[in-house]
Amino acid sequence: MIIESLHIDCFGCLQDFSCTFDSRLNIIEGDNEAGKSTLAAFVRYMLYGFGRAGGTELAEKKKRINWEKGRAAGSMTVRVGDRRYRIERSTTLVTGPRGKDTYRETGTLIDLGNRMPLSWNDQKTPGERFLGVPEAVFLSTAFVPQVSARIGGGELTEAIENLLFSGDESLNVQRALDKLEGLRRTLLHKSGRGGALYDLATREADVKARMAQAEKDNGAIFEKESALATVKRQLATAEKKQEEAEMHEKQEEAALLLVSYRRLHEAEHKLAEAEAALKNLDGLPAYRLHEGDLTDLALAGRTAKEAKARYLEAKQAREGYSGTGLDKNTELYLEKAQKGGGTAGLRALSETKKKHCMLTAVGGGCIAFAGLVLLILVLILPTAFGDLLALPYTLGSLLLLAGGGLGLEAYRVHRALTALYSLYGVKEQTEFLSRMDEIDRGREQVHAYRGAAKEAYDTETKLGVAYNRAVSELDTVVGRFGTRLPEENVEEFLNTLAETARRVMEKKKVYEAKVLSAQDVVDALSAQLIGTNEAAARAILPPDCEIRVEDVQLEEWRKQKDYFASQARILSRHVGELERELAALRARAQDPALLQAEWEALRDHSAAVREQHEACVMAYEAISGAGERLRAEISPRLSDFACRMMEELTDGRYRRIGIGSDLAVSVGTGDGTYSLDYLSAGTQDLSYLSLRMALIDLLYKEKPPVFFDESFAHQDNDRTERILRTLAERSAEGQQNLIFTCHTRESEMARRVAPEAAVIRMPSVGA
């Protein structure tokens, strides 16, 4: 056991004091009266309470109760094996209404692994629980005082013998021997002239003498008395067999009861296994889910998948709308028409230009023709105009020029129309008008196409929002399963997640069913066993009795019990009849049969007492011999361990050490064997220190922390350093050492032999 740390709320002179210990070697320094011994007493208080050893409980309480706070309290953290515990104790002084002082004590033992308090039993202190020894043994071995007093004496020797002999310090071997010896003396004195057996023998002789006289005086009733004795023996046999049958009946009933308890324990074990398996699943996210969550996951996954498909389909449809939807020529003609003022304007322009061209051409032709005719007339008939010839000639020329100008204008307009028609890929007006109609249809087609494109875009946007919402809802559902939705391979992820969750849920159902089934069995058996006691039933059966249902013959033993009970009643009535007959005979004479019955009763009683006496003698010899053999075995084991340690502590000077049955120590050197009384105080201290270490190695199931309170005062520097080195080496075996000293010598040496040793400085006096 390792003391990791402690906190003293108030204990004697110490208040609000905390310290942490090294698992191997600790030096606690402090001035005289600084509280070192109080600190050691606090550890003892944590382990065993107040003064249970030596009957000093009240004095120890008065000494350690803090005067200012009126109580002693604190806590200590220890490590036992791979588990850690915290011990908490508090003792409060309470003054009653009549001025009588009492003490209220509380204690808690907490398993720090699961933070659960353990049951606190005053009959088994933490020291006894963890170390396996009572307080007296702890103080005589692991609690080394300021002056290493001799170990041993009746109390410790007896405790060691009891522990090793019976496994229980409270089972006193010597007291058992004393009781056996006392019982033997009551049965028969060693001289043979006293005790129950002697008295029975005397009475038996007296009855025999009376029987001889009665036989002479009552020969007539001898036969009747003999018959009565026979019937009584038969009655005793019947009653004994009845008792045996009743005992077997109880044992069979107990066996059946234990079979039920065994089934109960098996069911409890199965219940615990199922609950443990169910608890192991409790940490998985799917443990808290149900079928509705799987349905939600499948529905959300399907909704997201369908929403994605619709979204991708809408996106693909929207991407199909590019440009205007027209072929390139129509799109080009539409663009030109829009730049040219529209198809209506182009139609009007074409019509206007055509009319203009026709009018100009016709007018120009007519005018030119008139001018030409006039010129021809002037040329043919010049005399017809006389002196006015110049005027018609001029007018004809002008008309011809005007007609030519109009012809040129008509040609220009025709060229413009031709260019306009050519711009739209036609040659004449009919085709041009058809082209315009085609452009109008294209415009309508573009308008419809763009409307469809916008509708496709709106649909894509709407389905995209729906898809994102479905993904968000799916992610929310996935969150119930303790994970997040991945960006890729969603469908595979959802299938895997659902399958994993389904397996967990199926396991949960299986384990829950097992728990319910086992619980039903436990409840049924528990209800069936109400009012029974397993320990009492087991106590009825012989030790190590193998219980098998097929071997139980309860009904057979009940029949035998009833049969012998019936025989006993018949024989008892017969005895009564014989006794009444004998009473009538004895009225006339002394009845030898009564004397015979008395003699037989004395003989049977004497035989029973003699068996009891022989059993006492055998038990006494067996226990006494076992105790002697045990003591003979203890001393060599202690001596061997102590020899090795004594040789190490004295650098080989003392290599032999003897230990008597009373734990008295003698030391051997090259000059002989000496009692410790002839050696120095320092050597005596080392001897008993070696004996303490040997006892610790022998008695403790868990290595205890060992306390040295100014224990090296008689040692020089070399031996002190050797002791510290030895203790540091033993700490590797799990022994924690706490050395209390008012000097700095031990801490300086400790740093040399064990650099990791902890040095704890107690507060200065008055600080």
Image: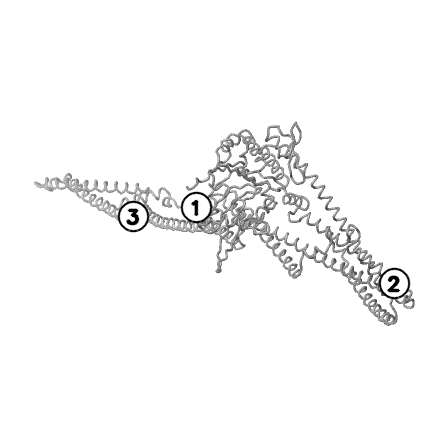
Nearer-the-camera pick, 263 or 696: 696
Left or right of residue 427, residue 491 in this image: right
Q: Position of residue 150 (x, y in %)?
A: 60, 39
Q: Position of residue 184 (x, y in %)?
A: 75, 52
Mark 1 vs mark 2: which is more N-terminal? 2
Q: Position of residue 93 (x, y in %)?
A: 49, 53
Which mark, residue 429? none
Q: Quadrant of residue 731?
A: top right
Name the residue type under label 2.
Answer: Met
Which quarter of the image is occupied by the C terminus? top left
Label 1 sits on a secondary structure element that is: helix
Q: How many marks?
A: 3
Mark 3 vs mark 1: which is more N-terminal? 1
Name the residue type under label 1.
Answer: Gln
Label 3 sits on a secondary structure element that is: helix
Q: Position of residue 310 (x, y in %)?
A: 45, 50
Answer above or below: position of 382 versus 504.
above
Binning the other alpha carbons within 10 Å of mark 1 as few (below 14), some (14 to 19) or many (20 upward) gives: few
Left or right of residue 620, residue 384 in this image: left
Binning the other alpha carbons within 10 Å of mark 3 as few (below 14), some (14 to 19) or many (20 upward) gives: many
Mark 3 vs mark 2: which is more N-terminal? 2
Name the residue type under label 3.
Answer: Thr
Q: Quadrant of residue 658?
A: top right
Label 2 sits on a secondary structure element that is: helix
* Residue carrying label 3: 343
Nearer-the-camera pick, 111 or 349: 111
* Residue carrying label 1: 316
Which quarter of the image is occupied by the N terminus? top right
* Residue carrying label 2: 211
